[in-house]
Image (cartoon, grey):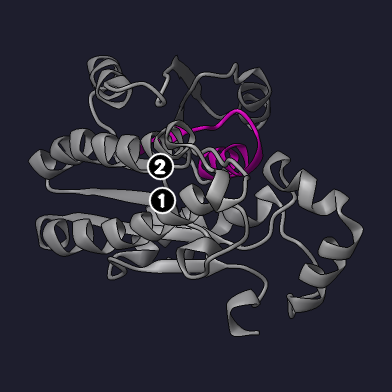
Amino acid sequence: MEAELFSLRGKTALVTGASRGLGQGMAVGLAQAGATVIGAGVSEMEETKQLIEGINGEFFHFKADLAVDGGAKELAKTVLANFENVDILVNNAGIIKRQEAEQFSDESFREVLQVNLDSLFALSRQIGNHMLERGSGSIINIASMLSFQGGLRVPAYTASKHAVAGLTKALGNEWGARGVRVNAIAPGYMETDNTEGIRNDEDRFAYISSRIPMGKWGTPEDLAGPVVFLASEASRYVNGHVLCVDGGWMSS
């Protein structure tokens, strides 16, 4: 009984930014639970494909540039033309730019919001309409610790991730009663390419690590369980929630 609650057999999941890092970890986790996984993004996803096929899972890849206006709409159109149903949407694609706020350009600010927020809403709206027609679906947005905090030298990223948390609640309010749950995962400090610069700064790495009650940084594999939980029947009464996967950071 318990295993069936977490089963995703017969489900199809669309994961943006699944070529590496957190997206890859979640894509593999969804496949392990039985889902057919569609990866979308500008990068090649051969490694993700090999990992999923190595566990006898199914993986498909569509090229998509979410940094351009209309990219998300075109992606949704392509996916829905090739797959009868999309049961799970994981909005993981995102970028970060670091610079002092007083020097942060309008172009950089807009680019970050286009990928992290605008495309997330557009894809959620397009795939969400498909889910609403069927009366079922799970949308999982990737928020951040910076959905709650200000951070340093990342004004656009912080603004976008605060907005992702708010949008998750807004969509959950509108769509929950119609069978489509909308939640988010807020990863803590994770060992990915995005945090390489911080981890290479010995003093900052030591300070951050000292603030994590579990005493270690997370890995992409640590998001596999949470994303399967939010995608499955195990979380059928969870909606509009931002789940922190942070080793206890927010409680410290």
* In this rendering, the label closer to the viewer, 1 or 2: 1
Q: Residue furthest front?
A: 102
Of the residues under marks 1 and 2, which one precedes in the sequence? 2
Residue 234: x and y in percent read: 39, 65
Question: Which label was assigned to residue 91?
Answer: 2
Left or right, 70 with respect to 64, comes to left
In what element is the residue under mark 2?
Answer: strand
Give the amino acid at mark 2.
Asn
Query: Looking at the picture, does residue 154 appear above or below residue 114?
Result: below
* Quadrant in the picture for residue 181: bottom left
Is any part of residue 91 visible from this angle?
A: yes
22 inside magenta stretch: yes
* Residue occupying image coordinates x 16% and y 55%: 179
Is any part of residue 3 visible from this angle?
A: no
Number of callouts in the render? 2
Q: Report the front residue among 124 and 153.
A: 153
In what element is the residue under mark 1?
Answer: helix
Give the amino acid at mark 1.
Ser
Q: Report the front residue among 1 and 225.
A: 225
- In the rendered image, which residue does mark 1 sit on? 160
* Quadrant in the picture for residue 232: bottom left
Residue 193: x and y in percent read: 72, 39
Question: Which label was assigned to residue 197?
Answer: none
* Residue occupying image coordinates x 60% and y 16%: 44
Left or right, 166 with respect to 204, comes to left
* Residue occupying image coordinates x 68% and y 60%: 189
19 inside magenta stretch: yes
Region of the chain picked out in magenta, as a range: 10-31
